[in-house]
Amino acid sequence: MYKIQTLNKIATVGVERFPRDMYEIASEILNPDAILVRSANMLDMELPSTVKAIARAGAGVNNIAVDKCSEKGVIVFNTPGANANGVKELVIAGMLLSSRRIIPGINWARSLAGKGDEVTKIIEKGKSDFTGPEIKGKKLGVIGLGAIGVMVANDAMELGMQVTGYDPFISVEAAWGLSRNVKRARGLESLLADSDYITLHVPLSDKTKGYISRERFAIMKKGVRLLNFARGGLVNNADLLEAIKEGIVSYYVTDFPDEELLTVENVIPLPHLGASTPEAEDNCAIMAVNQLKDFLENGNIKNSVNFPDCELDTFGASKRIVIANRNVPNMVGQITTVLAAEKINIAGMINRHKGEFAYNIIDIDGEMTDSVLDKLKEISGVIMVRKIER
């Protein structure tokens, strides 16, 4: 029986995928095998030694101490693409909100309450104060072509925009999904200089913090509309305010507003609504649960942020060992030497690495005793060993 702890309310359609004869699920549970989380802050949480994996029902993992998990061999999953459509729709809405002065127009119309029969005349006379350009035919620069960036680029093309994309690390899967009519930017600078609208879809890290700052604002076309539905921190707020003051940025639309931006007229602050749709929550929950199940029951990894994707078909094997280790030379040799010394036959094996860490799935013939597991754990560089019997 596997034990799953939930730190937030997880969509029922996802939780129901755990077979109740194999899983116990609760928000308060002792010695969980895995944790399901959405936005709960786990940064200072002391993980029970029994925890083997954490699944975040969402893309960002800023609320999880990923480095500490890696050191303990705890696999951290996220759900890239599960909320992509919800975010994409809001990006399109953000472009329209920043163009057509919809929000100021609504606020002004509401202010006319009590004017009676004069309202129609006042509106016809005053509507010219809220004119704004159409997005059709305008140039959109998409920075980051992951699941969301690709969907934004493709749909913007369908709306008649001229779309240029920039992502030096685009995956093969994303490239297959990208419309062939999306132009590839020669470089980031050329995209910034040529775009009427710029939308950010890159992760937040030490390298991307303040990704859009004074130097890059200086390259942009005057009157550009900048959208950030990726992460707070990607845009340097002080430099942004200066760019707004100078007329470089006509509007900034963000799903991650800070205190200093809330009262700025040319900033449209949204309360992190990107993935706030029932469909996105369901999709994230389903993906997170499926990934946890496959890991706990089969040892397979897909969409981990700290360990490599690693999947091995069972081919009828009933016993499997999974091993996480530091990505250093001769680890596989040491592991197979231990198994050979114990006369354990390897029926199938796969090894993958990602950054500082590697992961192994080994199907075996014969018995796997606790003493053999202990010998594997004693290998320098091994950080997690687990036996799976099906």
Image: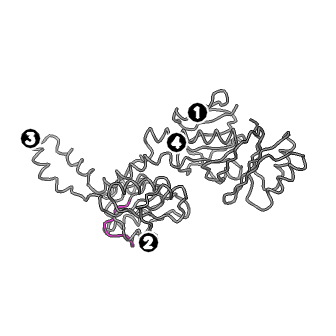
Disc 4 residue type? Cys
Q: Is residue 55 magenta?
A: no
The residue that disc 1 covers is 17
The residue that disc 2 covers is 189
Q: Are marks 1 and 3 in contact (CB under 8 Å)?
A: no
Disc 1 residue type? Arg
Q: Is residue 219 magenta?
A: yes
- How dense is the environment of label 3, judged by Cα within 10 Å: few (below 14), some, or many (20 and up)? few
- Relative placement, left or right, of 77 versus 253 is right
Disc 2 residue type? Glu
The quarter in which the N terminus is drawn is top right
Task: Report the Cα–Cα distance between label 1 and label 2.
Answer: 46 Å
The tag earlier along the polypeptide, 1 or 2, is 1
Residue 342 at what x, y percent from top left?
A: 90, 46
The residue at 86%/53% (across/down) is: 337
The stretch in magenta equals 218-226
The tag earlier along the polypeptide, 1 or 3, is 1
User: Of residues 382 and 65, which is closer to you in this image?
Assistant: 382
Q: Nearer the viewer, mark 1 or mark 2?
A: 1
Residue 279 at what x, y percent from top left?
A: 45, 39
Q: Are marks 4 and 3 in contact (CB under 8 Å)?
A: no
User: SS class of the residue under badge 3?
Assistant: helix
Above or below for 163 versus 281 = below
- How dense is the environment of label 4, judged by Cα within 10 Å: few (below 14), some, or many (20 and up)? many
- Relative placement, left or right, of 107 versus 52 is left
The residue that disc 3 covers is 117
Asked which colour scheme the image uses, the reply is one colour
Q: Are marks 1 and 4 in contact (CB under 8 Å)?
A: no
User: SS class of the residue under badge 4?
Assistant: helix
The tag earlier along the polypeptide, 1 or 4, is 1
Mark linked to residue 336:
none
Task: Report the Cα–Cα distance between label 2 and label 4.
Answer: 34 Å
